[in-house]
Amino acid sequence: MQCANGGLLYPCDYCIHVVCSDCVVMPESYVDGMKFTCFGCHLIDSETGLRKKPSPYLGLEGHLQPLDVKAPRDL
């Protein structure tokens, strides 16, 4: 899939949202099939539906380093 701005889209494995490669930098170790979590799902506890305590955004199941997130750009 591609974003309207030309970036790749990474679908969240837990909801209907996608994240563009212009917004998040995937590590070189990323491979298709890894479970990806969007920003929104990262902030919400899936069992309680409440906001979690702040923590580094890892984004990928099994990935131990926070993902680099780019600041939104003017379109």
Image (cartoon, rainbow, N blue to C red):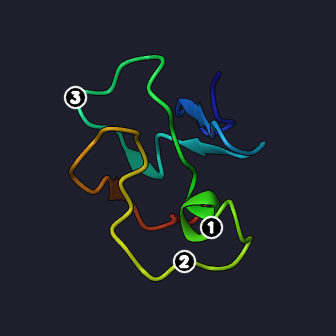
Write down the quadrant of residue 27 in the picture.
Answer: top left
* Front residue (pair 33, 4): 33
Q: Which picture quadrant has residue 44?
A: bottom right
Which residue is most to the top? 32
Q: Nearer the viewer, mark 3 or mark 2?
A: 2
Pointer 1 residue: 45
Q: Identify which amino acid the numbered label 2 is placed on.
A: Lys
Q: Callout 1: few (<14), some (14-19), or many (20+) C-alpha neighbours within 10 Å?
A: few
Above-or-below relation of 20 to 42: above
Q: CA distance from mark 2 to mark 1?
A: 6 Å
- The CA span between labels 1 and 3 is 28 Å
Splitting the image into 4 quarters, where does residue 12 fall?
A: top right
**The N terminus - image quarter:** top right
Q: Amino acid at mark 1?
A: Asp
Which sits earlier in the primary sequence, circle 3 or circle 2?
3
Judged by depth in the image, the label closer to the viewer, 1 or 3, is 1
Q: Extreme right residue here? A: 16
Q: Give the residue at x 45% y 17%.
A: 32
Q: Which mark is residue 52?
A: 2
Point 37% across, 74% down: residue = 55
- First in sequence, mark 2 or 1: give its number: 1
Identify which amino acid the numbered label 3 is placed on.
Glu
Element type at marker 1?
Answer: loop
Above or below residue 6? Residue 73 is below
Please give the residue where the numbered disc 3 appears in the rendered image: 28
Residue 52 image offset from top left, x and y in percent: 54, 77
Label 2, residues with CA under 10 Å away: few <14, some 14-19, many ≥20: few
| Percent x, y of residue 68 | 30, 56
Nearer to me, 67 or 35: 35
Query: Pointer 2 and pointer 1: residues touching (CB < 8 Å)?
Result: yes
Side of 54 relative to 62 (left or right): right
Point out the tag, 1 or 3, that comes first from the N-terminus.
3
